[in-house]
């Protein structure tokens, strides 16, 4: 199975040579080719997830070629972190997850070519949490905390009457958030603890914000 994958990958590389990046400067750089073997779209980061983004949402079965500097860290190797993305059915937005037990290490030397295959995660954990609110009132609403107006994942600020808004939130204690309506009407959202990998669902009926459950994603 692995040989068959390697053969098809080499054939793909020969056809796609030069699609990404430019001619390699072999004196100082190495060519690194990432092959998405998984069933998810993937984003690859250099070192940790706070490091530089190498490629974003690479589709299953696709490759991405880039040039990187040698590891130069006494043989430990360069580290790559992978975020797996999947589309939430019915909501039409992407959310990401990670495999907490997986990290890719490759010692990189100048002038060399490396093929790094990204497998499917053995244990996928959600890395984002969301707040979802149905506006059952007769006027638009906003999701706020103090003076901050939050933006929905679709880029809009307000949720029209009869529509649903979805917002990305931090995990942990969710307190002192409000639903804002009209000029000076604020309605408190009941406090709750958010965990990554969940959508927390509420309804606003014009007088109060009511919890309506949670959805694991």
Image (cartoon, rainbow, N blue to C red):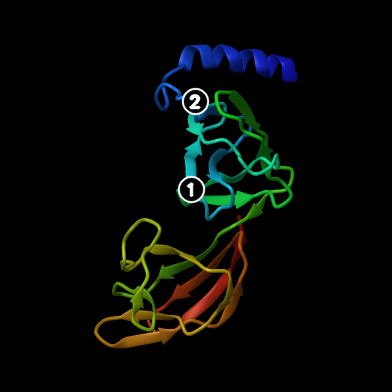
Expressed as whole percent of the image width and height from the top left, the position of residue 195 reads 62, 67
Tag 1, which secondary structure?
Answer: loop
Which residue: 35% across, 77% down?
A: 148
- Looking at the image, residue 204 sits to the left or right of residue 5; the answer is left
Which residue: 67% across, 34% down?
A: 119
Expressed as whole percent of the image width and height from the top left, the position of residue 85 reads 55, 45
Expressed as whole percent of the image width and height from the top left, the position of residue 93 reads 46, 50
Q: Is residue 89 above or below residue 110?
A: below
Q: Nearer the viewer, residue 86 or 26?
A: 26
Tag 2, which secondary structure?
Answer: loop
How many circles with numbers are drawn on the protein? 2
Q: Nearer the viewer, residue 13 or 27?
A: 27
Q: Which mark is residue 27?
A: 2
Expressed as whole percent of the image width and height from the top left, the position of residue 198 reads 60, 62
Mark 1, Cα crowd under 10 Å, few <14 / some 14-19 / many 20+, is few
Quickly name the residue at label 1.
52
Occupied quadrant, residue 134:
bottom left
Q: Nearer the viewer, residue 67 or 35?
A: 67
Query: Which tag, 2 or 1, sits closer to the chain's start?
Result: 2
Which residue: 41% across, 78% down?
A: 205
Q: Nearer the viewer, residue 139 or 100?
A: 100
Q: Quadrant of the N terminus?
A: top right
């Amino acid at each position: 199975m692995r040989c068959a994958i390697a053969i098809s990958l080499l054939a793909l590389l020969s056809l796609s040579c030069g699609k990404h990046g430019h001619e390699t400067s072999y004196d100082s750089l190495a060519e690194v080719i990432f092959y998405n073997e998984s069933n998810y779209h993937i984003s690859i980061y250099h070192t940790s997830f706070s490091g530089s983004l190498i490629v974003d949402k690479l589709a299953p079965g696709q490759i991405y070629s880039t040039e990187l500097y040698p590891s130069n860290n006494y043989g430990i190797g360069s580290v790559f972190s992978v975020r797996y993305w999947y589309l939430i059915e019915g909501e039409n937005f992407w959310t990401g997850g990670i495999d907490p037990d997986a990290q890719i290490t490759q010692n990189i030397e100048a002038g060399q070519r490396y093929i790094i295959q990204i497998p499917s995660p053995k244990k996928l954990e959600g890395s984002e949490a969301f707040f979802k609110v149905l506006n059952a009132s007769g006027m638009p609403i906003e999701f706020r905390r103090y003076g901050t107006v939050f933006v929905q994942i679709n880029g809009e600020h307000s949720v029209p009457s009869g529509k649903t808004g979805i917002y990305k939130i931090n995990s942990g204690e969710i307190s002192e958030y409000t639903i804002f309506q009209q000029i000076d009407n604020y309605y408190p959202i009941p406090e709750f603890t958010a965990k990554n990998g969940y959508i927390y669902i509420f309804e606003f009926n014009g007088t109060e914000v009511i919890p309506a459950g949670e959805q694991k994603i």
